[in-house]
Amino acid sequence: MVNNAAIVNEGSGWQRVIAINLTAVIVGTKLAAAHMRKDKGGKGGRIVSTLSVAGLVQSHMTPVYCATKHGVRAYITGLCKDPTRPDQGIEYAMIAPDAVDTPMFQSVDSNRVLFWDELKDEMKRRMMKPQAVGEAFLQLLRSDVINGAILQVDIQGKTFRHMECVNDGVTFDPSKAF
Ligand SMILES: NC(=O)C1=CN([C@@H]2O[C@H](COP(=O)(O)OP(=O)(O)OC[C@H]3O[C@@H](n4cnc5c(N)ncnc54)[C@H](O)[C@@H]3O)[C@@H](O)[C@H]2O)C=CC1
Ligand SMILES: CC/C=C\C[C@H](O)/C=C/C=C\C=C\C=C\C(=O)[C@@H](O)C/C=C\CCC(=O)O
């Protein structure tokens, strides 16, 4: 299961950002986990949530959006550490891209993102094609173990934030996760 839907809007619709980016992730994750958990008759599985670099740093450009992505990181990290998780057979991981050329990015303006006029050139310089995130996502899923992983993706490449980089640089070492 993938938690991917999100919006960005630091303007008058900011409460909806919290509802979609954070509350809905918690609701969806609870529903999925209840269905998936092996100790309750499910088959187990993986739940991957899309963060953003905004879930790793604090930005004056998108403070509400950042709060939701930090909230997702805290919530999912808590589930990663649940001592009953191995019996549930569910792994939790996150992917944290920098700017990506999607409708979200293309629709950004100074009503939705603060200081946009000053920062847009820098964000556009860092912008990746969506394929880069798709490839990183598949690389994450190819790891034998992903619980606790946060895979940061930017124009420099891919970096695991909560794991040791080994082999091809993107293989998760769960013993180094926390
Ligand atoms: N585009 C970017 O620069 C970056 C995006 N992200 C994250 O990547 C993920 C995907 O975003 P993008 O593809 O860029 O945006 P997008 O705007 O192209 O796609 C977002 C999707 O979420 C769906 N969605 C929005 N509100 C919804 C709702 N209430 N119910 C159901 N679906 C809803 C939209 O229909 C759309 O298909 C998001 O979590 C976003 O925060 C992370 C880093 C950078
Ligand atoms: C503007 C596009 C709208 C939404 C998409 C995107 O998810 C939003 C990003 C919002 C904030 C970006 C934050 C920017 C971060 C930085 O300023 C960089 O200097 C640091 C980036 C990564 C560093 C990670 C780290 O080493 O801690």
Image (cartoon, helix red, strand yellow):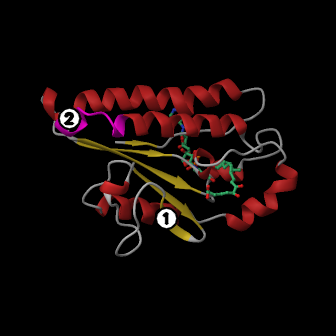
As drawn, 154 above or below 61: below
Q: Position of residue 136 (x, y in %)?
A: 44, 63
Instruction: State which quadrant residue 64 falls in.
Output: top right
As shown in the figure, which amino acid type bears the numbered disc 2?
Gln
Q: Give the secondary structure at mark 2.
A: helix
Q: Position of residue 155 (x, y in %)?
A: 60, 69
As drawn, 98 above or below 57: below
- Look at mark 1 in the image and give the residue it sits on: 159
**Which disc is residue 88 wearing?**
2
Q: CA distance from mark 1 to mark 2?
A: 28 Å
Is 90 left, or right, of 97 in this rendering? left
As shown in the figure, which amino acid type bears the numbered disc 1?
Thr
- Specify the segment rendered in magenta: 79-87
Seen from the viewer's position, the closer of residues 39 and 15 is 39
Seen from the viewer's position, the closer of residues 38 and 149 is 149
The residue drawn where x is 37% and y is 75% is 168
**Which one is earlier in the sequence, the residue at label 1 or at label 2?**
2
Instruction: State which quadrant residue 7 falls in.
Output: top right
